[in-house]
Amino acid sequence: MKLTVDDQTDTPIDPHKDAQTPAYILDIKALAELGRKPELFARGEDLFWDHPHISKMMLQAHLNPETDAASRRPEIIDATVAWLVSELGLNPNASFIDLGCGPGLYCTRLARRGLEVTGLDYSRRSIQYAREQAKREGLSIEYRYQNYLTMDYEERFDAASIIFCDLGALSDDDRDTFLERVYRALKPGGVFVADVFTQRGRAKGRATAGWDAYESSFWRPHPHLVLTSTFAYPEDNVELDQYIVIEEDGGTSLYRIWDHHYTADTLTAVVEARGFVVEGVWGSLTGEKYHKEKSEMVAVVARKPRN
């Protein structure tokens, strides 16, 4: 579209612009500043998991059986639960907490096997769905809407999990706080399982830098722009996918998704530094063998000592 210029103000004039449509100035300088490489683990928007639209889209992704976008596909979840019950020796009535449980896909399957299950998640929408699903099936599952960094259980559970690489999204300080709280929540002899991406897995899932205009998308239900950037912090084994969402009225929101990738040795080291004893290293929580050069994930089974 061709623009003319007001001779008195040097302001571009759009001859086709509706006079009733408000004009907004895009602050390019501010956007450039937002787009700079941030300090390691600098935070973006606090409201993410409970954003009215994003949480809706996240739940849809969790429940989509055709993709691994938010949760694993049903057949992988089934295999994971079967392997956990077998590998950990979980008998009926064993107490299990799934941290970052989402809509309860693992909790439901564990409860069907007779375990005493608790699910913790920071998305109201996912927790509400999980509660409704448990009620429909007549399953006694305790679901709590809570940030797992603030949980305060004391020696309550026989087993705890954080699944599908959530641990890698935490800063080092938050990760250590999380591991300390998990340790405290487990009974003596209790077991903790976690998986994270390796560098190979992270590279496969890395966002594509650029910009896109949408009528609607994961981020917003109305027209908007999304500026996507990726940043590497190789000395810390960390990468960042950053999204700047620009609204029609010129408002911007900044979302940062951090990913700390690990090897078997580095994951073992951080888990054992919080008091656990790592008993096994795997290529996934379905029992795949870990290959240093080939695996896209690394998983650990770690136990809290009995004394």
Image (spheres, rainbow, N blue to C red):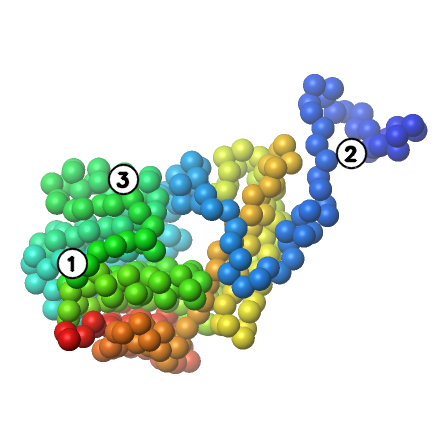
Q: Is residue 89 left or right of residue 4?
A: left
Q: Position of residue 20 (x, y in %)?
A: 70, 19
Residue 9 visible in this rendered orientation of the protein: yes
Q: Residue at 50% of width from left, 68% of height from top?
A: 238
Q: Quadrant of residue 169?
A: bottom left
For marks 3 and 2, the one nearer the N-term is 2
Q: Amino acid at mark 1?
A: Arg
Which quadrant does the N terminus fall into?
top right
Whether 180 is drawn above or below 64: the answer is: below
Q: Position of residue 168 (x, y in %)?
A: 41, 64
Q: Position of residue 147 (x, y in %)?
A: 34, 50
Q: Amino acid at mark 2?
A: Met
Q: Position of residue 103 (x, y in %)?
A: 28, 46
Mark 3 = which residue?
129
Mark 2 = which residue?
1
Measure the alpha-carbon separation of dots 1 and 3. 25 Å
* Image mark for residue 156: 1
